[in-house]
Amino acid sequence: MSNLDYLKSEHHEFLDAAAEAMADDRLQGILGQLNDSFSQRNRDAWNAFPGSDQAREQARAIKDETLAELDKHLETLERSVMEGGGTVHWAADGEEACDAVLKIARSANAQRVVKSKSMTSEEIHLNQALETAGIETVETDLGEYILQVAGHRPSHIVAPAVHLSATDVASVLSTVSETPLANNRKELTAFARRKLRQSFAAADIGITGVNFAIAETGSIVLISNEGNARLTTSLPRIHIAIMGMEKVIPRLQDLPYFLKVLARAATGQKQSVYASIVTGARRAEEIDGPEEFHLIILDNGRSRILQGPLRESLFCIRCGACLNACPIYRNVGGHAYGGVYAGPIGAVITPLYDGLSENHHLPHASSLCGACQAACPVKIAIPDLLIKLREQLHQEPGQLGFFETAAYRFWARALRSPFAYRIGTWLATRTLGRWKRRSGWLQRLPGKLHGWTQKRDFPAPAPNRFRDWWKHEGRNEP
């Protein structure tokens, strides 16, 4: 299997996929460059923004207040969209969302679709549904287009093709070029632009995601650094926007707080190149824009999350900042996570959307260092959410083996009994503690605990218990 081919496969075991990624020298070099560029730009952008903390707190408060009355704001959004001449479709899951798109396409006898970047459409596997129905579908974001040609899944929320080098991109795009393309970024971009403009001109339907939906006006907001989103919404005669139900914000005046923090968190920019506010279909006096506008509001488990202890995960604005900051992502990349969403936030929402038992490794795919929470523009407590998922995971039948169950029960009983705790610590210092005197480290732990020492040594227990030290020395010290 080649370096590029393995990225097409679906990884369901995080540990196996992570080991494969760490053994890929090419990928490791790319991730190293990504970390140096993205992370530094993120830090510089926040440092240059004097009111960053207040803006982040306000954005978080708006998300919190909106989710508290989400049903009301969604009803307002539906009413506003319909007043603007648009149509709203409600989808309980990905299948219903895809069916809604296909129904619109069939009623319009559409044969060609162009799409701007949308993680929600990736979540519901829309491209596969369209292609199965015989509808030609073209991704128009440069990164997404490269991935579509290569047959890869996105590896980053903001930079989906970040796992590919310029040489890889030249190799991929040469498969759809009449002549081989050189490893030259300007030449590769110019080739993609020529190909994609033909698709824009021929498309019947343009499909976008939604960064934010403004309830009071019925507008959708699209944030991008390429002009493809504007072409997708203005050239085809039908525009379909697909949004997760948590993307709504109440008022237009709330939007600037998110515009201030999103670009800084995502790419380190003060502002993205394009911030488009689209309200309904083309008016009679307008010369461009779609004849029809459809908004699909997707649940797909979000209403269930809203009622549970991991509600805060719905604050996410899909900026990718937590990926840039995470030491795990920065070593294994995005494909190791196995789902559409990678990194720390992916380790939270993938089990919530796709099932916890099916993604049992992801809640543990974190060092809980807190870098993700510090980087998040709306201050999501991702480490706390991961701990709650781990708790839920351990409560599911079959997730803990006999050894782990017995060990946790023994440990819990020992902590509840002073006598048992004293005996246990005494035995530890008389056995493992003796190794401490020789080397200070344990090179191999027994049984399943060996996982701790496969890549690093484990500190041995102290040769003396704290209670013994306190009894003979501690209480006499000033």
Image: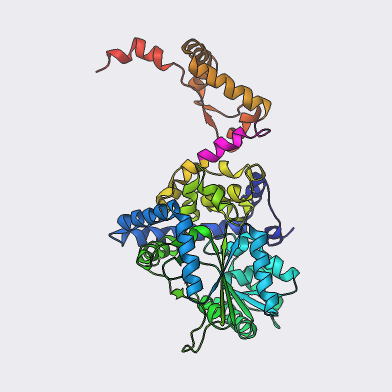
- Whole-percent x and y of residue 398? 68, 33
- Whole-percent x and y of residue 379? 40, 51
**Residue 401 appears left or right of 83:** right
**Residue 184 appears left or right of 39:** right
The one of 410 and 102 positioned closer to us in this rendering = 102
Number of marks drawn? 0
From this view, report whether residue 337 is shown above or below residue 136.
above
Residue 162 visible, this angle: no
| Chief secondary structure of the magenta portion | helix
Q: Residue placed at 64% from the left, 81% from the top? A: 204
Residues shaded magenta: 387-400
The one of 364 and 39 positioned closer to us in this rendering = 364
Q: Quadrant of the N terminus?
A: bottom right
From this view, report whether residue 1 is shown above or below residue 286.
above
- Whole-percent x and y of residue 233? 54, 78
- Whole-percent x and y of residue 71? 48, 56
Q: Residue placed at 42% from the left, 65% from the top? A: 263
The one of 432 and 286 positioned closer to us in this rendering = 286
Q: What kind of colouring is applied to the model shown? A: rainbow
Image-quadrant location for residue 442: top right
Residue 200 visible, this angle: yes
**Residue 86 appears left or right of 151:** left
